[in-house]
Image (cartoon, rainbow, N blue to C red):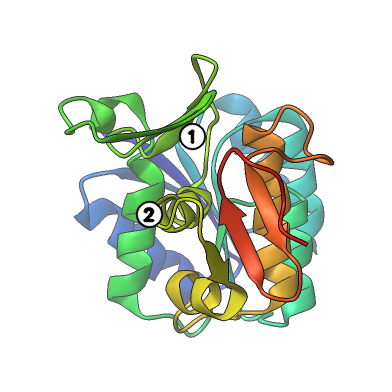
Amino acid sequence: MPRRVLIVEDDAVSRQLLKRLVEIEGDAAEPASGYYEALELIDRQPFDLILLDLTLEDGDGLDLCRHIRARHQTPIMIITSRGASADVVTGLELGADDYVVKPFNIDVLTARIRAQLRRTPETRRGEAVDQIRIGRLVIDNGLRDAIVEGSPAGLTNKEFELLMLLARRLGRAVAKEEILDHLFEGEVRSEKILAVYIRRLRQKIETDPDNPTTLHTVRGFGYRLGSSGPVD
């Protein structure tokens, strides 16, 4: 069964391009030219992914992102020409799962859309399972998710990539520069954006995100994954 993707984009050319990219992959695309049309479609039917431009003629994309996340858990990918790190950070803090800055590479965008849609149950079936266990946490490469005390954490693609990078260096500190190079090649990148992902990851895998026991900050250097105490 094809998955449904909502495309919220006020530029007709960009909207048609995104629609074509989604449909080439065998999925269904529903276009919306603005804020209120998108709200109407979201309330009418479920979607597997929302591609959201931040600059809309009849409203602000960040406000729309906030509204969607307050009511739905549908993955949101921001696609925008507003590439300032402050806009990216705000979008992520409001609940967006990923972002792409215009002008984008079509192959890269397609791969990242595919990665977000991979989180649906239909595409998870049959994948090989490769697990890393850290105390109460299980990192499942087949699901591309973390299991915390038996329940899926619901990691986004980038959150999972970050967790796997740290898990492969279990017990060892990984520099912020290396993490940024790994996660944000060719994208807007800053330590503020990385800090947003770290905070979101802690909220999903830690019992007390303000006092982490698994994902530690190594002050002045980077981050470390392990069950022992933080390195200061």
Q: What x and y, as percent, mark residue 151?
A: 52, 17
Q: What x and y, as percent, mark residue 83?
A: 66, 81
Viewer-closest of 148 and 83: 148
Q: Does residue 159 appear left or right of residue 17 in this picture? A: right
Labelled disc at residue 47: 1
State if disc 1 and disc 2 touch (CB < 8 Å): no
Q: Indicate the secondary structure of the residue bearing disc 2.
A: loop
- Residue pictured at 78% horizontal, 41% vertical: 67
- Residue pictured at 64% horizontal, 35% vertical: 204
Q: What amino acid does circle 2 point to?
A: Arg
Of the 4 image quadrants, the one containing the C terminus is: bottom right
Of the 4 image quadrants, the one containing the N terminus is: top left
How many other residues sit within 10 Å of disc 2, few (<14), some (14-19) or many (≥20)?
Answer: few
Q: Earlier in the sequence, mark 2 or mark 1?
A: 1
Q: What amino acid does circle 1 point to?
A: Phe
- Mark 2–mark 1 Cα distance, whole angstroms, equals 33 Å
Above or below: residue 73 compared with residue 180 = above
Labelled disc at residue 88: none
Q: Is residue 55 visible?
A: no
Residue picked out by circle 2: 168
Tag in front: 2 or 1: 2
